[in-house]
């Protein structure tokens, strides 16, 4: 049993029961203080962040295996992520002890506390990782079935390969943005229904995709694959991902090589990386796989995590956000270990900071559908918001906010928010 996940642990920092950041979470992020532009590496507790850059300088980790490594002095988490599970556990234990109710080290040192514990409202969260490569999977059976049904009809909804391998495409890392960054409606080439030739202009069918993603910790070598059982040692933690999608661009461009411009104009991630150690108590079985995958993709029974997920929509005209999707990470057919094993089975190397997203996370019920494409059945069944407004797809001014958490007994291991607002297309 990992004592850092003990549900009974309490901190000297006040944490409400619905906070995403109790002492059992301890996620990692990068922040900028309003008064000071140099980024600091941080963890979160309750409504505060702890300055890891400062406490490392003060020697808090000097008796641990990361002593002298200065992994929290850069502008991203990559150095720390590259060290691997042993170092991650050591630091997590040290942080857990610092925050425990009976530990006076920071609690009773006013000067130190004022210096290193900062109200979350006083910092801006920025991109936590230098991301080299980004891959997006397509691992929800319900999502693939819904999309396949819309495109090809119910008989041929799932392609023959789908239940044998985790389908994916190589995405674009340069346009991954942090929660809170607005993005412009993309322009591109589409072929409208009754047109005789393609046209150029702003996308008229803009959508979100409810996803999660994991970051690669230690790199692998070219030519070496990562086995399904070793995969967990290469996974640092997870974030929420909104894979914004222009469906009209996608429909026209995608054959035969898959998504390209329909997905490359922006992908939003949440700022806090929740570690696999924090998620461990919420491990649960994934859907049964039939047929059994080939042996390189076979892993043990508790392969995934029970993470409740929501999508909230806030129109420009409204102050209230409305929950339009409720889903769960554990609906995914292919798990993170299988995704990483499959990705590297050819000998493709992965590097520290690579992001692997899950694909849209839909489930069996209509409310579980993780995109507007599915929720409105390609616009045939618009959704009605409480204001009376309807949506087939996203309108300018709409803000989409993903959130998610694991529900423990009296506490939550949460991911915070992953939000983005759609601005009008940029004029020529
Ligand atoms: Mn996607």
Image (spheres, rainbow, N blue to C red):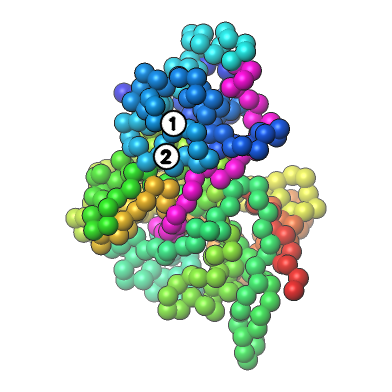
Quadrant where the C terminus is found in the figure: bottom right
Label 2: which secondary element: helix
Would you say the beta carbon of the disc 2 residue lies within 8 angstroms of ligand 1? Answer: no
Measured along the vertical axis of the image, is residue 283 above or below residue 251? Answer: above
Please give the range of residues in magenta. Answer: 113-140
Q: Judge left or right: residue 239 versus residue 317.
A: left
Number of residues whose C-alpha sits closer than 10 Å to that of mark 1, classed few (under 14), some (14–19) or many (20 or more): some
Magenta span includes 115: yes
Quadrant where the N terminus is found in the figure: top left
The residue nearer to you, when weighing 407 against 348, is 348
| Label at residue 79 | 2
Would you say the beta carbon of the disc 1 residue lies within 8 angstroms of ligand 1? Answer: no
Please count the marks in the image. Answer: 2
| Label at residue 379 | none
The residue nearer to you, when weighing 118 against 6, is 118
Number of residues whose C-alpha sits closer than 10 Å to that of mark 2, classed few (under 14), some (14–19) or many (20 or more): some
Measured along the vertical axis of the image, is residue 317 above or below residue 257? Answer: above
- Residue placed at 63% from the left, 25% from the top? 118
Outermost residue on the right side: it is 317
Outermost residue on the left side: it is 295
- Residue placed at 42% from the left, 64% from the top? 170
Label 1: which secondary element: loop
Of circles 2 and 1, the one toward us is: 1
Which residue bears the numbered disc 1? 70
Q: Judge left or right: residue 139 versus residue 114.
A: left
Q: Is residue 76 visible?
A: yes
The residue nearer to you, when weighing 212 against 79, is 79
Percent position of residue 239, x then y = 49, 44
Q: Are marks 2 and 1 in contact (CB under 8 Å)?
A: yes
Q: Is residue 358 visible?
A: no
């Amino acid at each position: 049993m990992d004592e850092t996940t003990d549900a009974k642990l309490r901190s000297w920092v006040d944490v409400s029961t619905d906070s995403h950041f109790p002492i059992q979470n301890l996620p990692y992020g990068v922040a900028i203080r309003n008064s000071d532009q140099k980024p600091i590496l941080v963890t979160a507790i309750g409504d505060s962040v702890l300055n890891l850059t400062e406490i490392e300088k003060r020697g808090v980790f000097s008796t641990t295996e990361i002593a002298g490594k200065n992994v929290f002095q850069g502008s991203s988490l990559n150095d720390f992520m590259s060290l691997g599970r042993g170092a991650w556990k050591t630091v997590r234990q040290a942080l857990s002890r610092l925050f425990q109710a009976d530990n006076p080290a920071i609690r009773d040192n006013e000067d130190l506390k004022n210096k290193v514990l900062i109200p979350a409202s006083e910092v801006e969260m920025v991109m936590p990782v230098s991301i080299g490569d980004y891959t997006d999977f397509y691992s929800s059976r319900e999502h693939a079935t819904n999309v396949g049904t819309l495109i090809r009809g119910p008989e041929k909804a799932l392609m023959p390969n789908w239940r044998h391998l985790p389908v994916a495409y190589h995405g674009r890392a340069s346009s991954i943005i942090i929660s809170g960054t607005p993005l412009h409606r993309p322009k591109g080439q589409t072929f409208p229904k009754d047109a005789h030739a393609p046209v150029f202009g702003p996308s008229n069918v803009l959508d979100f995709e409810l996803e999660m993603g994991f970051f690669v910790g230690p790199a692998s070598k070219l030519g070496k694959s990562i086995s399904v059982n070793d995969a967990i040692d290469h996974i640092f933690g997870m974030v929420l991902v909104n894979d914004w999608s222009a469906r009209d661009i996608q429909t026209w461009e995608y054959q035969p090589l898959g998504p390209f411009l329909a997905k490359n104009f922006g992908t939003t991630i949440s700022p806090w990386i929740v570690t696999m150690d924090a998620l461990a108590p919420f491990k649960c079985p994934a859907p049964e796989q039939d047929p059994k995958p080939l042996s390189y993709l076979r892993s043990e029974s508790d392969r995934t995590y029970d993470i409740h997920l929501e999508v909230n929509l806030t129109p420009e005209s409204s102050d209230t956000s409305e929950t339009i999707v409720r889903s769960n990470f554990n609906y995914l057919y292919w798990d993170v270990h299988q995704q990483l094993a499959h990705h590297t089975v050819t000998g493709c190397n992965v590097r520290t900071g690579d992001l692997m997203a899950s694909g849209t996370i839909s489930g069996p019920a209509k409310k579980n559908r993780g995109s507007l494409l599915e929720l409105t059945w390609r616009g045939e069944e618009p959704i009605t918001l409480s204001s009376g407004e309807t949506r087939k797809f996203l309108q300018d001014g709409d803000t989409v906010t993903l959130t998610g958490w694991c529900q423990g007994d009296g506490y939550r291991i949460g991911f915070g928010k992953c939000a983005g607002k759609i601005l009008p297309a940029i004029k020529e």
